Amino acid sequence: MTQEAFFRTPKQKEIHIHHTDPLSIKSIANGLLDLLPLRQRSPIVLVCIGTDRSTGDSLGPLTGSFLQEASLSHFHVFGTLDEPVHAVNLQERLETIHTQFTNPFIIGVDACLGRMKNIGMIKVGTGPVKPGAGVKKELPHVGHMHMTGIVNVSGYMEFFVLQNTRLNLVMKMAKQLASAIIQADRIYADQKMPISHDWELTEENLS
């Protein structure tokens, strides 16, 4: 589980859309594709962070499990209900990813706490997620871009709030995220897609 605020620069992009919006899947997929390294085809790795031991923090592994069932063609998924990526093994999994893939482009997928009016919103943008920030844990930042869902309200007894988040909401948001990623995976193979920017792997954006 991460926090609502992200590291941003003037060049960074971010989209916000509610999971019930009829255009949510298309908008999320387009937002994802617009930020991928299309000129330099780096391996695309989704790190779906969280645990099924906390309802609110299960957005990541639920999304990962839906993606695993879909058998993606171009994106690689870490973090499912069977094999979650969480606070205990996060650093180890990141090391595994960098060993297994050359210059991977990493997308952090995580639950988020935010304002009451923003519950149900899904965010896609550049920059990492900061797992554990909502419950005051110091964990590695994850991703060259992020996909997050605000599952409940922040500000007070965050651990208790996560434990008491409605599974119905988290399931719906995970399905929207997974559907958008599946759509993006299918489109990503098209070499004729317009290219919005070049991906440059630097020491600064390695996670």
Image (cartoon, helix red, strand yellow):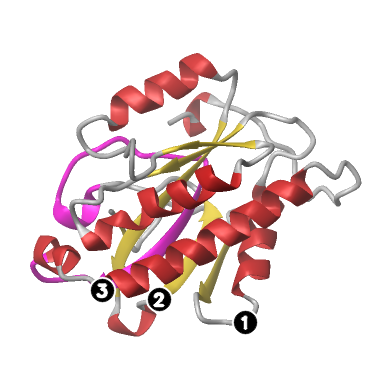
Residue ID for mark 2 = 120
> Which residue is under mark 1?
22
Q: Secondary structure at mark 3?
A: loop
Q: Give me the disc on residue 166.
A: 3
CA–CA distance between discs 1 and 3?
Answer: 22 Å
Nearer to us: label 3 or label 2 = 3
Disc 3 marks a residue whose amino acid type is: Arg
Q: Residue at x 61, y 28 (%)?
A: 201
At label 2, the amino acid type is: Gly
Looking at marks 3 and 2 on the same chain, the residue that comes earlier in the sequence is marked by 2
Calculate the distance from the C-alpha at mark 3 to the C-alpha at mark 2: 11 Å
The residue drawn where x is 28% and y is 53% is 1
Question: Where does the image place residue 33, in percent across and percent down from the top left?
Answer: 69, 52
**Magenta segment boundaries in residue numbering:** 132-157
In the visual, does 69 lie left or right of 156? right
Amino acid type at mark 1 = Pro
